[in-house]
């Protein structure tokens, strides 16, 4: 432990009057110092510093050590002081009003006194400090009493000077908002009285009601959705009525062929609500059919009801521009109509053979020359 203590080097700084005293005696006020090996407590280090720098005459009551501006107790272990720490050394608080001669005489008398009289000298020093503190308090109170009349006199002089110059504009500016507020409140109260006299209670806007900063004019409105829905429902009903004239078959037993033009509805299950969803009429031409007949690839076609001029309403269908193929499960087809293609011709012939006595009328979209293939020119 002694070797570790000897290796610690600290920077000793003598503060205030003690620093000037050491500066006059030694020529410096701070230096580097090695912690003695036999020092175990902070008090031992303080005693060594007093003896090393001959500070007994200057500080008869010993010295105080400060580490990071905090006092270090004499009973603390010296290991709290680490290498390269800065230790501030100063004398304890003494009577600053005492003269240097009396201080020197008291220090010499205390130095020559025996160890038995040390307790009495410490008691005397404590009593002197107590008396010094009381004197300082009295002086502070007296100075405050002197400053208070001076400040009041300065305030009076300043107020009289302002009154003489007539500088009251700041107060007028402060009073102006108050006056405007009073006028606005009077006007609002007047309007309220008029409304109450007419028997109409004034309307008060709620906390969450919309408040517009300036008047506005409506320049456009959104088309009513109900009208759009009604138009769409009417067109869908007309399309269903017109498609009833085309041949149909059960999707489960149908054998689709390539180039068949179909109009169909699909019934699927919504994965979010788990409810069945029936689609609108869709149109497409079969491109490929798998071997089992459960899946078909169709290209997108457009399907609509045409009613131009005085002509009879008819169903028009044609290939959509830039159409892409999509896969349809035959099990999802809910309603089916054949518009054109090999299956359409086969179903037409089957209907003619089943009832030859009845003259089959072509669909509304077919012409007189093309009874068996309506809208064939349009499909190609």
Image: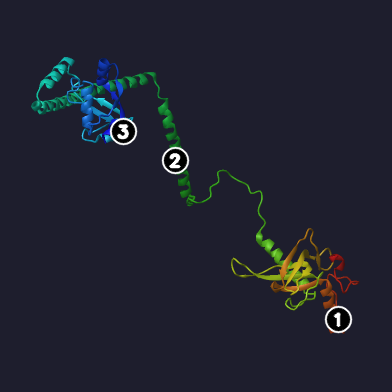
- Mark 1–mark 2 CB contact (< 8 Å): no
What residue is shown at x 66% (from left), y 60% (from top)? 225
- Along the line of sight, the residue nearer the viewer: 240 or 264: 264
* Left or right: 370, with 178 as reference point: right
The residue at which mark 1 appears reads as 352
- Occupied quadrant, residue 89: top left
Q: Position of residue 323 (x, y in %)?
A: 77, 60
Q: Position of residue 299 (x, y in %)?
A: 77, 64
The residue at which mark 3 appears reads as 82
Question: Of discs 3 and 1, which sits in the foreground?
Answer: 3
Disc on the earlier residue, 3 or 1 = 3
| Image quadrant occupied by the N terminus | top left
What residue is shown at x 87% (from left), y 80% (from top)? 359
Q: Secondary structure at mark 2?
A: helix
Q: Kindly report the distance in space between the C-alpha atoms of the residues bearing marks 2 and 3.
A: 73 Å
- Occupied quadrant, residue 131: top left
* Left or right: 255, with 162 as reference point: right
| Image quadrant occupied by the C terminus | bottom right
On screen, 188 above or below 328? above
């Amino acid at each position: 432990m002694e070797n570790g203590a000897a290796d610690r080097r600290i920077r000793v700084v003598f503060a205030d009057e003690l620093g000037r005293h050491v500066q006059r005696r030694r020529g410096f006020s701070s230096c580097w110092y090695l912690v003695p090996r036999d020092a175990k407590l902070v008090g031992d280090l303080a005693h060594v510093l007093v003896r090393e720098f001959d500070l007994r005459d200057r500080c008869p009551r010993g010295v105080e050590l400060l580490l990071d501006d905090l006092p270090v107790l004499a009973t603390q272990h010296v290991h709290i002081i680490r290498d390269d720490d800065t230790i501030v050394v100063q004398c304890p608080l003494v009577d600053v009003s005492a003269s240097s001669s009396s201080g020197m005489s008291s220090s010499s008398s205390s130095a020559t006194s025996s160890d038995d009289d040390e307790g009495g000298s410490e008691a005397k020093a404590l009593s002197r400090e107590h008396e010094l503190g009381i004197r300082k308090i009295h002086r502070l109170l007296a100075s405050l009493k002197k400053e208070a009349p001076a400040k009041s006199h300065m305030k009076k002089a300043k107020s009289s000077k302002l009154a003489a110059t007539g500088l009251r504009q700041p107060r007028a500016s402060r009073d102006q908002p108050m006056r405007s507020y009073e006028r606005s409140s009077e006007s609002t109260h007047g309007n309220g009285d008029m409304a109450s006299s007419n028997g109409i209670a004034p309307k008060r806007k709620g906390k969450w009601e919309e408040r517009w900063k300036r008047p506005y004019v409506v320049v456009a409105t959104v088309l009513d959705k109900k009208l759009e829905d009604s138009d769409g429902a009417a067109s869908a009903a007309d399309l269903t009525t017109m498609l009833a004239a085309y041949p149909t078959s059960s999707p489960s037993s149908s054998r689709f062929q390539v180039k068949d033009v179909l109009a169909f509805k699909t019934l699927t299950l919504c994965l979010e609500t788990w409810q069945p969803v029936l689609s609108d009429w869709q149109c497409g031409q079969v491109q490929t059919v798998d071997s089992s007949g459960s899946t078909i690839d169709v290209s997108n076609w457009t399907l609509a009801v045409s009613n131009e001029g005085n002509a009879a309403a008819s169903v028009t269908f044609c290939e959509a521009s830039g159409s892409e193929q999509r896969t349809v499960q035959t099990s999802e087809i809910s309603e089916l109509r054949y518009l054109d293609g090999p299956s359409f011709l086969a179903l037409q012939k089957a209907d003619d053979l089943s009832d030859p006595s009845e003259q089959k009328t072509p669909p509304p979209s077919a012409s007189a020359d093309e009874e068996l293939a309506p809208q064939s020119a349009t499909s190609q």
